[in-house]
Image: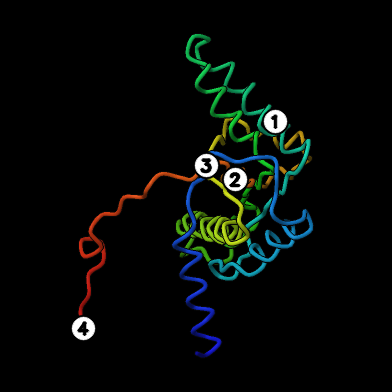
Amino acid sequence: MSNTSTISKGLLEAVKARRTYYGISKQSTISDDQIINLVQEAVKYSPSAFNSQSARAVVLLGENHDKLWNIVKETLRKMVAADQFASTEQRIDSFKAGYGSVLFFEDTTVIEGLQKQFASYADNFPKWSQQSSGIVQYVVWTLLEEQGLGASLQHYNPLIDEEVKQAWDIPSSWQLIAQMPFGTPTAEPGEKQFQPIDERVKIFK
């Protein structure tokens, strides 16, 4: 079997294995340096429209990870009725129970620059930016899965945006897109249901 076939099979298996894990622990299957390198490589090599490289990421470990989810919890506490907050708190605590979090951003300065440079595509650059961010998120998620770490993708932006920027001195031009808590899985996800693939993919040959 060729190296190409082996790599392709490995990639496909990783794609199939990636799932949403809500049960995660403060343990990691790999070192902090390996986690950081994984995120750096994903951001570096993920494609973007016009090679804009507008994706940004922040890796939060240890107390910084806990701080993020405390910010989320206290932000929501001000917005959710007290008698309904218990379930919200439980959900946030499940993310805080993880080992770390990756924050995904897009640099609006890059996007605005492209809009000025290529005016005829101006309306498309924000859409392409979101697509590029989605690719980075997916690559990180799949690579974490491949290393035996469970993750989920959360969206508490824009509610937490300003406090997050203040807490970690994030540039004002960075727009928060998503948050990904991760850790060693403590529970398996439920069986995934699939719609008929022939209703989702049409073939003409």
In which quadrant of the rendered view does residue 199 lie? bottom left
Comparing marks 3 and 1, which lies closer to the viewer?
A: 3
Amino acid type of disc 2?
Met
Q: CA distance from mark 3 to mark 1?
A: 31 Å
Local crowd size for mark 1, using a 10 Å CA cut-off: few (<14), some (14–19), many (≥20): some
Element on which disc 1 rests: helix
Element on which disc 2 rests: strand
- Horizontally, residue 180 falls left or right of residue 128, namely right
Task: Name the foreground residue: 118 vs 125.
Answer: 125
Amino acid type of disc 4?
Lys
Task: Name the foreground residue: 186 vs 22.
Answer: 186
Amino acid type of disc 3?
Ala
Label number found at residue 163? 1
Residue found at x 49% / y 47%: 20
Q: x, y percentage for residue 190?
A: 40, 44
Q: Which residue is mark 2?
A: 180
Q: Which residue is mark 4?
A: 205
Q: CA distance from mark 4 to mark 2?
A: 40 Å
Q: x, y percentage for residue 55?
A: 63, 57
Comparing marks 4 and 3, which lies closer to the viewer?
A: 3
Image position of 7 with respect to 88: above or below: below
Element on which disc 3 rests: loop
- Horizontally, residue 173 falls left or right of residue 125, namely right
Ranked by sequence position, the earlier of labels 4 and 3 is 3
Report the number of numbered marks: 4
Q: x, y percentage for residue 15?
A: 47, 64
Q: Which residue is mark 3?
A: 187
Comparing marks 2 and 1, which lies closer to the viewer?
A: 2
Question: Are dots 2 and 1 in contact, CB under 8 Å?
Answer: no
